[in-house]
Image (tube, rainbow, N blue to C red):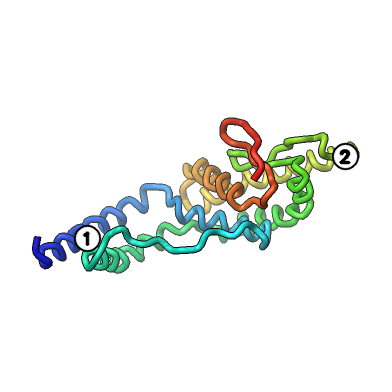
Amino acid sequence: MTPMTRWITAALTASSLALAACVTVNVYFPAAAAEKAADRIIEDIWGPGKEPKPAGGEQSSLGGIAGDVLVAALDFVIPAAQAQADIDISSPAIRALTASMKGRAGDLAPFFNSGAIGLTSNGLVETRDANAVALADRNRLRKLVADENADRNSLYREIATANGNPGWEADIRSTFAERWIANARAGWYYKTSAGAWTQK
């Protein structure tokens, strides 16, 4: 295959992929954008001090000029599609829910730290060990957990609705469940989908 043939093949492949990307962005749930939105909300609620994320950008697995041409063509053709894939988290309802959860985060943190509560695989908070809580504080903890879970359920629904896709609620919930756990502090507990508690 001559260099010119390779270049033409790469350009045609880029065009095909770009067209496919433009079509699928509006059909499929934008998982990467949802993860970024979840991380922004979680950072706003929990604040700094989360576990550092590994650095390093993604690199193309395609080599040489053909790979560079393909990446450049995709970057040129897809920006509008990527803008459509953003997850809107700026509605008044989402901001109010985030503020409510942020206001409660400081009260929940000692219970996360002691292992009394943990994160679940469905994006909620659950009491893990009531014995780790003084008897006088158990009712307060029950209310904190109930209020937190009500806000979380509303948040997932509101994000899906704000983005014009109420059917995304389960995907939003699943994404947040993963991101809550990924952003949890060392020593906090989370419950796997199999129902086992694990300490981070």
- Say whether disc 2 or disc 1 marks the residue closer to the N-terminus: 1
Q: Is residue 1 above or below residue 158?
A: below
Task: Determine which residue is flagged by label 2.
Answer: 134
Give x and y (percent) for residue 74.
Answer: 29, 63
- Say what amino acid the circle numbered 1 marks: Ser
Instruction: Say which mark, if any, is on residue 74.
Output: none
Q: Is residue 115 above or below residue 74?
A: above
Residue positioned 64% across, 60% down in the render: 44
Q: 23 or 111: nearer the eye?
A: 111
Residue positioned 67% across, 47% down in the render: 151
| Callouts 2 and 1 close, C-beta under 8 Å | no
Instruction: Look at the numbered disc 1 and give the secondary structure of its residue.
Output: helix
Mark pair 2, 1: CA separation: 63 Å
Q: How many marks?
A: 2
Q: Is residue 138 above or below residue 110?
A: above
Q: 30 or 68: nearer the eye?
A: 68
Residue positioned 27% across, 53% down in the render: 20
Give x and y (percent) for residue 167.
Answer: 47, 42
Give x and y (percent) for residue 166.
Answer: 49, 45
- Say what amino acid the circle numbered 2 marks: Ala
Quarter holding the C terminus is top right
Instruction: Say which mark, if any, is on residue 15.
Output: 1
* Quarter location, residue 32: bottom left
Q: 141 or 80: nearer the eye?
A: 141
Left or right: where 35 falls relative to 99? left
* Quarter location, residue 141: top right
| Extreme-top residue of the structure | 194
